[in-house]
Image (cartoon, rainbow, N blue to C red):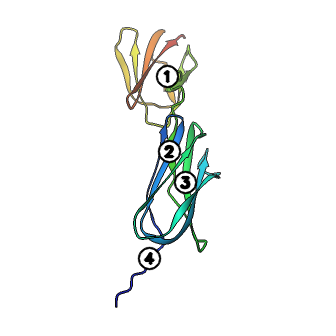
């Protein structure tokens, strides 16, 4: 005689993405037993968490189950995790997922630079968490620098004049003029 025992439900997928101005969370569990519910939690810094919703679990299930949750009021940058709670009180946290809204991105620069005009060092502050690459051109279009964004860019070797920084992040490109004035 063969006996089959179900183990507690296991979270196999957890996705979070921005959709318009909402955050859409989706996850899947394998077959399992005694899955009571999930608490959906969010954080602005990844350290202090707030429960923002509850999704009922499938109890005992013999198949994969899909779940979802939509948050209508995410921060511009929001960390999410799930707390899975079984009927016997056992709890398991999911991995953390990050959702970044692109509110009014057209009105924002990908980076902010200061001071402008500058006389020695240019501070470059990324607005997004994604990798950014910059190119610096002189007024005639000659490439002077190409590479990843570093926070402080030494411009002491540049002559007085107008320069162009081209910032690239994925398929977004931003061009910002700056002035060197010594």
Crowd class of label 2 (few under 14; some 14 to 19; many from 20; radius 10 Å): some
Residue 1 image point, x, y percent: 34, 91
**Separation of marks 1 and 2 at Cα, in angstroms:** 23 Å
Residue 123 image point, x, y percent: 54, 25
Crowd class of label 1 (few under 14; some 14 to 19; many from 20; radius 10 Å): few
Q: Give me the disc on residue 6.
A: 4
User: Marks 4 and 3: in contact by CB < 8 Å?
Assistant: no
Task: Give whichever of 147, 154 is nearer the camera.
Answer: 147
Is residue 69 rendered to the left or right of residue 141? right
N-terminal of the two: label 4 or label 2? 4
Crowd class of label 4 (few under 14; some 14 to 19; many from 20; radius 10 Å): few
Q: Quadrant of residue 170?
A: top left
**At 55% from the left edge and 47% from the top edge, which residue is drawn?**
79
N-terminal of the two: label 1 or label 4? 4
Element assignment for label 4: loop
Crowd class of label 3 (few under 14; some 14 to 19; many from 20; radius 10 Å): many
**Separation of marks 1 and 3 at Cα, in angstroms:** 29 Å
List the residue tagged with mark 3.
81
Nearer the viewer's eye, disc 1 or disc 2?
A: 2
**At 60% from the left edge and 49% from the top edge, which residue is drawn?**
42
N-terminal of the two: label 1 or label 3? 3
N-terminal of the two: label 2 or label 3? 2
List the residue tagged with mark 2.
24
Q: Quadrant of residue 166?
A: top left
- Tell which residue pokes out farthest to the bottom in this image: 1
N-terminal of the two: label 1 or label 2? 2
**Separation of marks 3 and 4 at Cα, in angstroms:** 25 Å
Nearer the viewer's eye, disc 2 or disc 3?
A: 2
List the residue tagged with mark 1.
106
């Amino acid at each position: 005689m063969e006996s089959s025992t179900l183990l507690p439900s296991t979270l196999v997928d957890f996705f979070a993405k921005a959709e318009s101005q909402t955050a859409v969370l989706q996850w899947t569990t394998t077959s399992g037993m005694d899955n009571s519910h999930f608490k959906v939690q969010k954080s602005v810094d990844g350290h202090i968490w707030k429960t923002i919703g509850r999704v009922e679990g499938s109890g005992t299930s013999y198949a994969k189950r899909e779940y979802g949750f939509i948050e209508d009021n995410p921060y511009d940058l929001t960390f999410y995790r799930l707390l899975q709670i079984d009927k016997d009180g056992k709890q398991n946290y999911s991995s953390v997922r990050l959702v970044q809204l692109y509110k009014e991105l057209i009105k924002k620069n990908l980076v902010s630079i200061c001071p402008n005009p500058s006389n020695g060092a240019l501070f470059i502050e990324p607005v997004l968490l994604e990798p950014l690459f910059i190119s610096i051109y002189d007024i005639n279009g000659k490439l002077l620098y190409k590479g990843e964004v570093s926070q402080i860019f030494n411009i002491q070797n540049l002559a007085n004049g107008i320069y162009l920084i081209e910032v690239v992040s994925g398929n977004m490109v931003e061009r910002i003029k700056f002035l060197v004035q010594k």
